[in-house]
Amino acid sequence: MTRLTQHTVETAPEASKDMLAQTEKAFGFVPGLYQVMAGAPQLLLTYGAIHQAFQKTSFNAKEQTVVWQTINVEHECTYCVPAHTALAGMMNVDPALNEALRNEAPLNGTKLEALRTFTLLVVRNRGHVTQADLDTFYAVGYGEQQVLEVILGVAQKVLSNYTNHIAQTPVDPAFTQFTWTRSSSEAA
């Protein structure tokens, strides 16, 4: 039970119904996050648009997973970590990469670790990064475009993570096998 209403296609505001119906048709169910967001149609539509936009960035599937899961874990979103674990599987991302992200372990590969570190800096410092932080990020092959794309990823995850925190959205049955909580020893 959430603290906010979880809508169905039938109970959702009119402006949310089409997106919920499309999601149900595509996945066979409507994720709890979408059910909650449906209460504010513009939030649901904006989240969907940002998600699609982030998937079209210059980041490959591994890099998208690094950005998403780094933010989900840092925000301690017990809904989004399992959901993105399942999504990473659908994107054929190596499960070892996802497990390292879930456990806040160093990543194999300098470039992916630099992406994780930079994403954490953006989140933790609310966008206040130093020139040295940028130079370190650029040194592994990223550029200004990827800086801006990390910001896009942060915007997407703030919408979902904060919604789930307030709503206390339960993990969908499709994702329960990936249930996650941050252990106290992992807390930053």
Image (cartoon, helix red, strand yellow):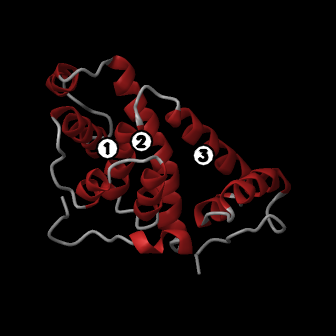
Residue for badge 2: 154
Image mark count: 3
Regarding mark 3 in the picture, which secondary structure is present there?
helix
Q: Point out the tag, 3 or 2, that comes first from the N-terminus.
A: 3
**Amino acid beneath label 1:** Val
Distance from Cα at disc 2 to Cα at disc 1: 7 Å
Decide: is 135 above or below 75: above
Q: Left or right? Give the position of 26 relative to 140.
A: right
Answer with the quarter of the image where residue 138 lies: top left
Decide: is 142 above or below 27: above
**Amino acid beneath label 2:** Val
Camera-side residue: 98 or 14? 98
Residue for badge 3: 47
Q: Left or right? Give the position of 68 relative to 107.
A: right
Mark 2–mark 1 CB contact (< 8 Å): yes
Q: Badge 1: how crowded within 10 Å, few (<14), some, or many (20+)? A: some
Residue at left offset 32%, top offset 55%? 95
Camera-side residue: 136 or 109? 109
Regarding mark 1 in the picture, which secondary structure is present there?
helix
**Amino acid beneath label 3:** Tyr
Decide: is 2 above or below 158: below
Q: Point out the tag, 1 or 3, that comes first from the N-terminus.
A: 3
Q: Which mark is residue 123?
A: 1
Q: Position of residue 56 (x, y in %)?
A: 52, 30
Q: Point out the tag, 2 or 1, that comes first from the N-terminus.
A: 1
Q: Left or right? Give the position of 135 relative to 157.
A: left
Report if residue 135 is visible in the image.
yes
Regarding mark 2 in the picture, which secondary structure is present there?
helix
Q: Check the picture and name the quadrant holding the C terminus.
A: bottom left
Q: Badge 3: how crowded within 10 Å, few (<14), some, or many (20+)? A: many
Residue at left offset 43%, top offset 25%? 58
